[in-house]
Amino acid sequence: MSTPSLPDMSKLSNSALDFIDDVRFGELLSKKSDAGRIREIAAKSKAKQALNLDEAAALLNADEPELVELIYDTARQLKKDVYGNRIVLFAPFYVGNLCMNDCQYCGFRRSNAEQIRHTLTVEELHEQVSRMLAMGQKRTIAVFGEHRNYGAQYIADTVREIYSVKYRSPKTGSISSLRRVNINAAPLDHGGYKIVREAGIGTYQVFQETYHKPTYRKMHPAGTRKSDFMWRLDSPARAIESGCDDVGLGALFGLASWKFDALSLVAHAIHLMSNYNVGPHTISFPRIRPASGLHIQEVIDNNVADRDFLRMIAVLRLSVPYTGLIVTAREPANVRQEALGFGVSQLDAGGRIEIGGYKDINSESVDAQQQALNREQFELGDVRSLDTVVKELLENGYIPSFCTACYRLGRTGEVFMEYAKPGFIQDFCTPNALSTLQEYLQDFASPETKAVGEKLVEQEIAKLPDDRRKQMLVQRLEKIRSTDKRDLFF
């Protein structure tokens, strides 16, 4: 690996602006919602139009049961119209837990003496990726602590190593590899983003953690790199200016008011759209979880109840119709299942977040008590195997998708928004999702999951309206079933 370096924190983006107006946001969130206006806003969302801040705040303030149900109904319809019944699956891949920061909620924080520090060697990295592939994973997000050792060139080198790993299925002899490597790492400067872009990364994700400045200062002590609120807030804009096709936003809920951080995520999306004509590719919204050396109640001032968490997801779906919403395995399985109905389009499944955690690929689950908190950032709430999650999705009528076609064919950013119109789902997304599902069923699924999956595949084929596209898909599925040909997409 190459010599590490720190980013130049002196140069912000061309659009650098602190668009988090605490006073204005507080005023917007103090207004009582009008039922008639909520119906108008819901109608605007249903027409796939992004909302402004006033409209998003009105939805967040809509506490009456009938208005909340209207928001849920609209979110369900938007999810169906934009994403269909597909759920994209991925798994996290933790590369190293060295960290220069001291974030009060994180197991990786530098003052945590309980954390066992380690960075995967190249040999360990290859072994871990091979074990992920043996589960059937096709997409990952590589996670790095914020440390001088994990500079842009190191991240780029790591991404290339991940892409290089190949795995042969013992069932069919087909060769697989990870087809999309997203990144969750420290903010970079323009030069750094260009370096990682050239390695073929997918989405570059930077969590703001909380947009509430007093809470941000409390959680991120002065003298650490992460204490610079503006450097972090501006990082997605720098990534876009440097040619990164997709950026991901996120906030850690439980630190500040959930309504404030939800509205701020919308504000961040609006800022990017206004300046670059493209919003975030994904938004994540995990709730804080236990971590090594952490007394969680000393950190949480605003615990987010399940009912508020689900409302927040629905409001985000209405506010940013074309942005992928990710509910992570920090949440328990029952909450994740319910959240799928309100606009979630991506799940991590079968993941292990300990450094070197992909060990027993045949285990169905690992109790939360067995998680090695001293080797991970936080405790997971859903530790079921990938096969278990896939089977549950199939039984509930969802298409588990490992598709990466749009990213590899340039259907991202502004282009995706043009494609995400009536016909996009039937022409591209559903056929590609079914192709990747068929790969999983042939190469990795348990007999029980395969039986359920084959039935759903046939049902979904019958629904396709275009006979020519349907016939092409049938031919591709048969090729997957009868040969070792893979990665066939429209």
Image (cartoon, rainbow, N blue to C red):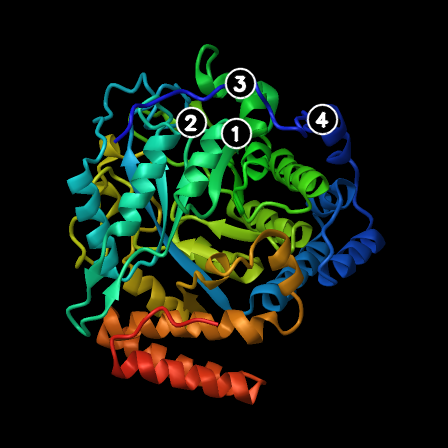
Cα distance between the residues tagged 1 and 3 = 17 Å
Cα distance between the residues tagged 2 and 4 = 28 Å
Is 282 located above or below residue 238 in the figure?
A: below
Which residue lies under the disc numbered 3?
228
N-terminal label among 2 and 4: 4
User: Which amino acid type is shown beneath numbered disc 4?
Assistant: Asp
Which residue lies under the disc numbered 4?
21
Task: Look at discs 3 and 2 and give the one toward the viewer.
Answer: 3
Where disc 4 sits, the SS reads loop
User: Which amino acid type is shown beneath numbered disc 2?
Assistant: Gln
**Counting other residues with Cα less than 10 Å from the Cα at mark 3, is it few (<14), some (14-19), or many (20 or more)?**
some
Where disc 1 sits, the SS reads helix
N-terminal label among 1 and 2: 1
Give residue 34's position: percent from left, percent from top: 82, 48
Which residue lies under the disc numbered 2?
297
Cα distance between the residues tagged 1 and 4 = 26 Å
Where disc 2 sits, the SS reads helix
N-terminal label among 3 and 2: 3
